[in-house]
Amino acid sequence: MKSVALFDLDGTLVDADHLHYEAWREMVAPHGIELSLETYISEIMGQPNSLLARNFLKDLDEDVALKLVDDKEAMFRSLFVGLKPAKGLTDFLDWLEKNGVPIGVVTNAPRDNAEHQLVNLGLVERFPTVVIGAEVANPKPHPDPYLVGLERLQGRAASSLAFEDSRSGITAGKAAGLAVIGLATSMSEEALLATGVELAIPDYEDPRLRPFAAARLGIA
């Protein structure tokens, strides 16, 4: 069994949550829903679309809700232009590779979104292992996506890391037995720490990151 690093996608590999918020706000406005950023963070961010259609959009007919979710994702992909990987990410991935740490993506994003983002970020070859929440037994906040990621990489949870930015993802990573590092892209570092992350950082250039990761992953 190996020490591995598993990364959420939206808000973790790339700061794209503002595009998700914009797309959601645009999509729900014709239905009389005024979506605040606070509601987006607390009720939508990191949640699988299947749950959002049933819960957040529960007042809409099911077929309308499902179409709205699909249309929102198409709008998000159209907005995802010219974005770059999170600050310091590529250097950090180089460091992990140099030290022989396998990496993977674990996301609740639909596969079309995940592939679109990884291709446009120039990261698709970095991450041959991509676990999609909707393609396993239960999406985040259940631990299943992370457990599948560990299985595919032959990882040992007790010496591995998860990188997350949402309550849903943090809950999933912790339930899978991983130490979770929180990226303060949408939530503050204080809010992330309140969810139980081991470390909260603004980006991958934070000087606390590599010492913490080295200790957890067993890098000398």
Image (cartoon, grey):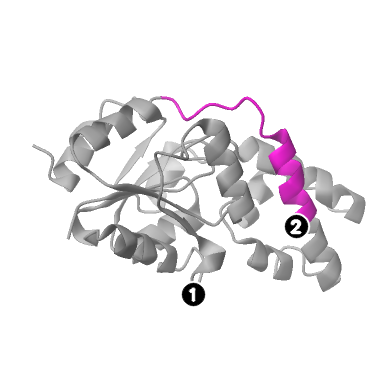
Q: Which residues are magenta?
A: 69-87
- Return the residue at label 2: 69
Q: From the viewer's perspective, is residue 4 above or below residue 208?
A: below
Amino acid type at mark 2: Val
Residue 145 in view (yes/no): yes
Q: Position of residue 118 (x, y in %)?
A: 52, 40
Taking the image as shown, residue 197 lies to the left or right of residue 25, namely left
Amino acid type at mark 1: Ala
Taking the image as shown, residue 153 lies to the left or right of residue 112, namely left
Magenta region includes residue 192: no
Question: How far apart in space, not on screen, are marks 1 and 2 (Cα)?
Answer: 21 Å
Q: Residue at left 58%, top 54%?
A: 111
Give residue 137's mark: 1
Label 2 environment density (alpha carbons within 10 Å; few <14, some 14–19, many ≥20): many
Q: Position of residue 99 (x, y in %)?
A: 18, 37
Circle 1: element type: loop
Q: Quadrant of the N terminus?
A: bottom left
Q: Could you say which is closer to the camera, residue 216 or residue 135?
A: 135
Q: Quadrant of residue 186?
A: top right
Taking the image as shown, residue 48 lies to the left or right of residue 176, namely right
Q: Position of residue 31 (x, y in %)?
A: 89, 56
Circle 2: element type: helix
Give residue 191's mark: none
Magenta region includes residue 80: yes
